[in-house]
Image (tube, helix red, strand yellow):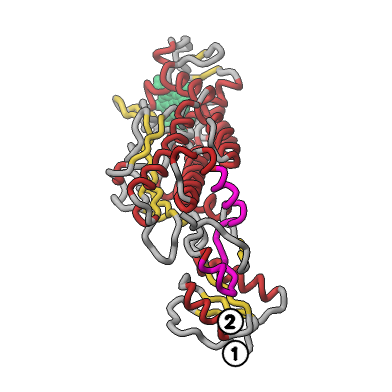
Amino acid sequence: MPGWPRGLLLSLTPLLLAAGGGEFDVGRSIYREGQGQDPIVARHREFDVDLEPRNRACARCHGADGGGTREGGVVAPPLTGARGMSPDGALEWLTAALSTGRGLGGRALKSVMPAYGLSERDQRALAAYLRTLPYPPEPGLAADSLRLGVTLDGAGLDAEATAAVGLLMQREIDAINRQGGLFGRQLVLADRDLAGVVVTMAWAADPAATGPRFSVRPPVSDRAQEIACGVLHPPVSEQARWLAQHLNERGRRVRIVEAEARDAPSAGEAEAIIYKGRDIALAAGMANNKTGDIFAFSDLVGGQLSSAAQAPLTLVTPIDIRAQMRRVEQLQRDEAAMGLSPRTASIALEMLRALAIVATALKQQGRRLTGVELCQRISVLARESWRFSLLPAGASPTLDQP
Ligand code: HEC
């Protein structure tokens, strides 16, 4: 896969390789067909006879999706509870039920549940599979596909640039799918019908958050509402708090000016002004009047950087801006035929980072995904990826040159 940002691939590939194949397939085969990598014995507890593969397949009693069945007064419970368990917890639960005939809480199970002899690796594979069982059905999640939504409406790109970003994301998706997809499902990137997707990555047109936001949909049984799962980049308020602390620790008196300020306020006693807005002209006005340092916030892809370079102020960015510039140049070189502007390349890199976070969250979450749980995981991963960097005047930024 030439041309892919190296850091991203490194972080993405091992996870996805692990997700695509072996263990999942073995677990599914035991569950659905009663066949694993190693021989399986299943005894009917009451009549003490061995069961054939077809009769010992878990799906026969617990349902194809693990939702459980109820037949003639016999209730085979749902096995989807494993999804919320740790891998160890799921394995423990499974082992107890299969070999000692004990259910949750040590309860003795009725004799309808057969006694199983499975190799250790087959048990592990089965436990891993159980943690992914999809029940009830969820929007965007089909037997062999998993739909992810993307919108770039707020990114300020023209149609051609939007298509270029979409193409770069699609290539990453193709690479994941060539490795087997996620949990045996192929990923599908959707830019419309966003009601039918598991997760949406949207570059929102919201001045308070310039980067992608994540949202998920709860299972159909819940309200048909989107749940916001946080943002790829820290909001200005978060960055301002970080910066104020950074300056205070260095013994600087700080004054914070709200973004709504219309006039350049006086610095007073402060040695540094943190202006919580992106109006670079206004911030520059403050810089001209005062002696203290002025800090203002950059749109992360560098849209305002060169105008800022002329003003005596320091820009705060929610990414590692210098590393981003190097990555942008690399992507532009690798994809020379696309003629990416620095800004488009930077947006593409951020969308690929959003995709990596979503893929990681899905992988960690298992194939069975409810809105809230997935949401929390995405939000934690996004926060962990938050960065700040300061770009002092004269640092010759280049991101917004056409
Ligand atoms: C012939 C039907 C049948 C088959 C086949 C079967 N089960 Fe069960 N299983 C049951 C029934 C019925 C119960 C509930 C028993 C009870 O509540 O006392 C049960 C209970 C369980 C429990 C315990 C649930 C709890 O309450 O903690 C687990 C775990 C479980 N089965 C897993 C499996 C797995 C995994 C397989 C395949 C390897 C499997 N079962 C195959 C019928 C079956």
Left or right, 192 with respect to 166, comes to left
Q: Are marks 1 and 2 in contact (CB under 8 Å)?
A: yes
Disc sitting over residue 268 in the figure: 1
**Is residue 109 something that shows in the picture?**
no
Q: Residue at x 51, y 16 (%)?
A: 36
Q: Position of residue 29 (x, y in %)?
A: 46, 19
Dot 1: what SS?
loop
Q: Which residues are magenta?
A: 307-330
Is 54 included in the stretch rendered in magenta?
A: no
**Is residue 34 something that shows in the picture?**
yes
Compared with 158, 8 (above or below) is above
**Residue on which disc 2 sits:** 255
Q: Residue at x 42, y 16 (%)?
A: 33
Q: Position of residue 388 (x, y in %)?
A: 59, 61
Dot 2: what SS?
strand
Q: Residues within 10 Å of mark 2 (few under 14, many from 20)?
A: many
Q: Residue at x 36, y 26 (%)?
A: 64
